[in-house]
């Protein structure tokens, strides 16, 4: 069983590493405004997931999975917030 999990994790890691890195940008946007928007979106995502992170976990594996799910949800919320503000994903150069 551990072998299968190791293989799956290696495949997932390779898939993540093989993807081209993307960055959120806005036509005519400046870095100061981008930082401000990103900070606000991160704050809103943290508020939206704050109650989810208060669960008590007695199993380490469950806690790790739970934390990973919360991080993934925060990233989704930040992405949706930035897209709603007019940002788009572009390849990192």
Image: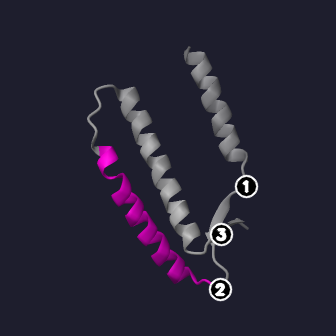
Which residue in the structure is indicated by mark 1? 20
Quadrant (top left/top right/bottom left/bottom right) for the N terminus: top right
Looking at the image, the residue that sits furthest to the top is 1
Q: Main secondary structure of the magenta part?
A: helix
> Residue 47's spot in the image, x, y percent?
34, 59
Q: Is residue 1 above or below residue 60?
A: above
Mark 3 or mark 2: which comes first in sequence? 2
Numbered mark located on residue 88 in the image: 3
Q: Nearer the viewer, mark 1 or mark 2?
A: 2
> Would residue 7 be found to the left or right of residue 38 on screen?
right
Q: Which residue is mark 2?
A: 28
Q: Residue at x 37, y 52 (%)?
A: 49
Mark 1 and mark 2 lie on one chain; the one further toward the N terminus is 1
User: How dense is the environment of label 2, judged by Cα within 10 Å: few (below 14), some, or many (20 and up)?
Assistant: few
The CA span between labels 3 and 1 is 15 Å
Spot occupied by residue 22 in the image (x, y as percentages of width and height):
67, 61
Residue range in magenta is: 29-53
Q: Residues within 10 Å of mark 3 (few under 14, many from 20)?
A: some
- Please give left or right for residue 93 compared with residue 78 in the image: right
The residue at the point 61 percent across, 19 percent down is 4
Q: Position of residue 70 (x, y in %)?
A: 42, 46
Q: Nearer the viewer, mark 3 or mark 1?
A: 3
Query: Is residue 48 rendered magenta in the image?
Result: yes
Q: Looking at the picture, does residue 67 appear above or below residue 37? A: above
Q: Is residue 25 above or below residue 51?
A: below
């Amino acid at each position: 069983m551990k072998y299968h999990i190791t293989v799956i994790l290696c495949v997932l890691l390779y898939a993540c590493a093989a993807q081209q890195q993307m960055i959120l940008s806005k036509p005519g946007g400046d870095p100061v405004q981008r930082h401000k928007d990103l900070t606000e979106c991160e704050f809103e995502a943290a508020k939206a997931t704050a109650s989810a992170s208060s669960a008590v976990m007695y199993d380490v594996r469950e806690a790790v999975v739970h934390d990973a799910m919360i991080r993934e949800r925060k990233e989704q919320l930040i992405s949706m917030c930035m897209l709603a503000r007019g940002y788009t994903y572009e390849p990192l150069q």
